[in-house]
Image (cartoon, rainbow, N blue to C red):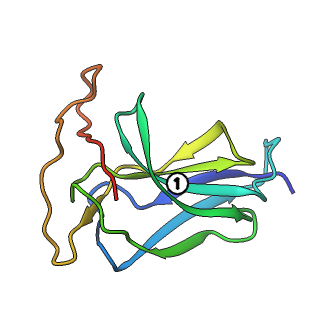
Amino acid sequence: ARATIEPVSPGPGDVFRSGSPCLISWDTHRSDSTDSWRNATIYLMSGSNLNMSLVTTVVEHLDGTNMTSYDWPCPNVVPNADIYFYQFSNNGVSTGSTWTSRFTIASYSGNTTLPENSKQPGGAPIPWGVGHL
């Protein structure tokens, strides 16, 4: 079955604590697609919109056509800021990838900091920073 993946959550303003469940959800649209999304990978990312940085791989070999969500334990990251997003890729290639909005991974105790940058390099008012485990 051909399908496209449209990330639904997390979204703007969502905050998850390190060590707590992080729910990722998406809609599957079966029309107008040339991809099957039966070998999807979800990556936790950070960085600017045009210079994204891999934080860690969340799950590989996911059949994104038969499920619409995935739960995993949020990792302990630095910084604990609103700079993280997920990238959905199919068959190990970045062409056709889709992304969630940015969200926050807070510390185990719920503490957060402001993103390192308040605007994208091109001036768009989307805060960002580079996170790591």
In the rendered image, which quarter is residue 22 located in?
Answer: bottom left
Left or right: 78 with respect to 68? Answer: left
Look at 18% across and 36% down and name the residue there. Answer: 117
Q: Position of residue 122 (x, y in %)?
A: 29, 19
- The residue nearer to you, when weighing 34 against 107, is 107
Furthest-front residue in this view: 133
Left or right: 28 with respect to 23? Answer: right
Label tally: 1
Left or right: 11 with respect to 2? Answer: left
Q: Position of residue 128 (x, y in %)?
A: 26, 40
Residue that label 1 marks? 43
In the rendered image, which quarter is residue 115 located in?
Answer: top left
The disc labelled 1 sits on which kind of residue? Answer: Tyr
- State whether residue 14 is above or below residue 5: below
- State whether residue 125 is above or below residue 84: above
Question: Which SS class for mark 1?
Answer: strand
- The residue nearer to you, when weighing 70 against 53, is 53
In the rendered image, which quarter is residue 121 located in?
Answer: top left
Look at 53% across and 66% down and name the residue there. Answer: 25
Crowding around mark 1 (Cα neighbors within 10 Å: few <14, some 14 to 19, many 20+) is many
Look at 37% across and 57% down and name the residue there. Answer: 11
Look at 30% across and 43% down and name the residue there. Answer: 130
The quadrant in which the C terminus is found is bottom left
Q: Position of residue 14 (x, y in %)?
A: 30, 63
Left or right: 43 with respect to 1? Answer: left
The quadrant in which the N terminus is found is bottom right
Furthest-top residue in this view: 122
